[in-house]
Amino acid sequence: MIGSILPPWVVAVDTFDDHDAVLFPAEEEVISRSVETRRKEFATARMCARQAMGLLGLPPQPLLPGLRGEPQWPKGFVGSITHCAGYRGAVVSPGGDTITIGIDAEPNEPLSNGVLEAVSLPEERKALRALAVDHPEVSWDRLLFSAKESVYKAWFPLAKRWLDFEDAILTFNPVLGAFSARILVTGPHVGGQQLAGFTGKYMARDGLLLTAIVMATSTASRRHRPVLRRPVPQPVRA
């Protein structure tokens, strides 16, 4: 499902159900003290990631968490993993095409009381109130949270440091299903330029909110890669 808001060179595999996925011993060690529900979502998300990597010709291999819990992708590849109630997904791309990726999934439900104030700026809250009037089918507070999660996942591999919720201001375009993020702190240099923000896409479907950021290399959008345009597995339903 998330593949519909990604560029064609990025491979996505997702599912709506947990599966009895096999983990590598090193992954089992990471998750050994977690409750069963956490283990299942971890294992299913890793299954999706390995299927996506397989479509790019990579053999099955462990995906261990890094400094902040981010998956450590094989050298020369970038990706992102997400999971929420009723959804697990992973996306992967060759590093020659993509600089960084961030994805997130959330239920299309309002945030708990007080959370919006903790993750947003006053300007964002004002904009969300206006969006809610014209598009009440979207839980805009939750979508903002999801988009900021995607921003952080795209930011951290480049900056290697924390980004607080108030360190980025987001705006949404409901006509295009898109959003932009302006970074309010000094960003790292990427491709000879200081990183000032991201653009991304979102969708609301089947009770879910999905957000995705893909920062492409300068040549990716001009290059055709037929092997990556073949159909990828549809979300699996048990």
Image: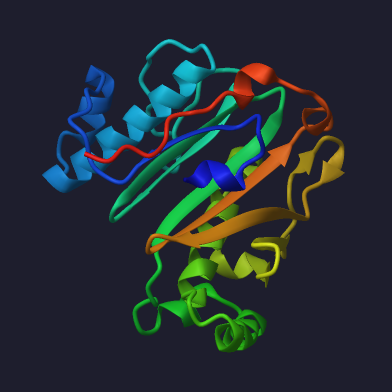
Which residue, as the protein is rendered here, is positioned at the far right?
A: 192
Q: Residue 159 location in percent, x, y?
A: 65, 43
Q: Residue at x 54, y 69 (%)?
A: 144
The quarter of the displayed image where residue 38 is located: top left
Q: Residue 71 location in percent, x, y?
A: 44, 33
Visible in this render: residue 160? no
Figure label count: 0
Q: Residue at x 58, y 50 (%)?
A: 212
Q: Residue at x 47, y 21 (%)?
A: 53
**Foreground: 162 or 173?**
173
Left/right of residue 32 with respect to residue 70 in the rendered view = left
Visible in this render: residue 189? yes
Q: Residue 34 location in percent, x, y?
A: 17, 43
142 over 68 or under it: above or below: below
Q: Residue 189 location in percent, x, y?
A: 79, 41
The quarter of the displayed image where residue 46 is located: top left
72 over 17 or under it: above or below: above
56 over 108 or under it: above or below: above
